[in-house]
Image (cartoon, grey):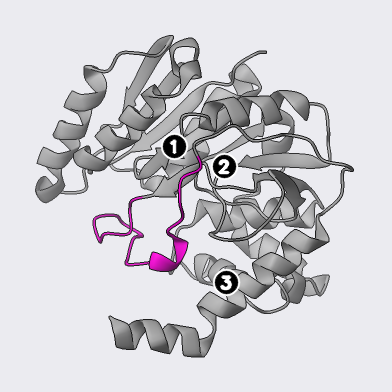
Amino acid sequence: MTLAPVLLFTYNRPAHTKQTLDALLKNPLSKESSLFVFSDGYKNEMDRQQVEEVRSIIRSLDGFKDIQIRENAENKGLAANIIEGVTRVVDEYGKVIVVEDDLIASPFFLTFMNDVLNKFEREKKIGHVHGYCYPNMGLPDLFLIKWTGSWGWGTWERAWKYFNPDGKYLLHELERRKLTKTFDFNGSYPYTRMLRRQVKGENDSWAIRWNASLFLADILSANAGKSLVQNIGFDGTGTHSGNKNIYITDLYEGELATEVSEIKENEDARRAFEQYYRKTNSFWAKVKRRLVK
């Protein structure tokens, strides 16, 4: 099995970065994997110390096959850093596994990701692999869905070519082809609104553009049915973080099967996502969380 390089994107959270790296190092495949670390530059003097602490951690890192570090002299922001980093490495290696500095991976995360990346390397209808799963979904170990997540993911060079950074074009196509309701899981989650906000400059999400790019190309994602990733960034320390307990899930520490019966979207998975979104993102669900908070 040819192993995909692992890309880690960091900024100013040394404690989170260390937890992310410690978890990756518990994967048996870490010592056989190449690691690329992208450290973004600080925005101001307030961030400088934390960025330097992160860089001290990654400079002393060991335990991977080889390690390459890129330290930005200036702050590019997460979106630009990920787009540039993924493009550079995937063009050279043909496939990548991507994690950010607030993700805890299970010991079999790299095994799952590499198994799926190798198994479907030539399957043009699949363009994305995702290791996180919403809690209590009751789905197969591996399922296909027309949606991409960004918490521990991978892709191939052939699929990354579909990435279109032009959010305005993506939004126009979704509206022109009358796909916004489907894109939003029958109106249960505001993905179109997220894209519209990106177009207006109210967010700089690369992930919503990646999601829309593959959706419009009718390309599927291969997802773990039990979560191999936990997000520890909802503690107020991250640029886009907040208290989102609805996404907390148990970390599955076993191996997952990587078989699917056919290359088509799992309709049960799509219904499960819609039900989950309606349960957690409805007006009254948000009101209840706010009152509890």
- Image quarter (top left, top right, bottom left or bottom right) of the C terminus: bottom left
Q: Residue at x 17, y 25 (%)?
A: 56
Regarding residue 184, the answer to whether it shows in the image is no
Q: Do the residues labelled 1 and 3 touch (CB within 8 Å)?
A: no
When the figure is inspected, residue 46 is found, relative to residue 86, above or below; the finding is below
When the figure is inspected, residue 219 is found, relative to residue 112, above or below; the finding is below
Disc 3 target residue: 196
Please provide percent x and percent y for residue 34.
Answer: 47, 15
Q: What element carries label 1?
A: strand
Residue type of the residue flagged with mark 3 = Arg
Residue type of the residue flagged with mark 1 = Ala
Residue 102 sits in quarter: top left
Q: Is residue 95 magenta?
A: no
Q: Counting residues from the N terminus, which is met first, the one under dot 2 or under dot 3? A: 2
Disc 2 target residue: 131
Numbered badge on residue 105: 1
Regarding residue 51, the answer to whether it shows in the image is yes
Please provide percent x and percent y for residue 149.
Answer: 58, 51
Q: Pointer 2: residues within 10 angstroms few (<14), some, or many (20+)?
A: many
Q: Which of marks 2 and 3 is in front?
A: 2
When the figure is inspected, residue 79 is found, relative to residue 193, above or below; the finding is above
Would you say 62 lies left or right of 84 here? Answer: left
Between 135 and 43, which is closer to the camera in this rendering?
135
Would you say 288 lies left or right of 95 here? Answer: left
Q: Is mark 3 on a helix, strand or loop?
A: helix
Between 177 and 184, which is closer to the camera in this rendering?
184
Q: Are marks 2 and 1 in contact (CB under 8 Å)?
A: yes
| Residue situated furthest right in the rendering | 262
Q: Which residue is drawn at 46% across and 35% down?
A: 106
Extent of the magenta region:
232-252
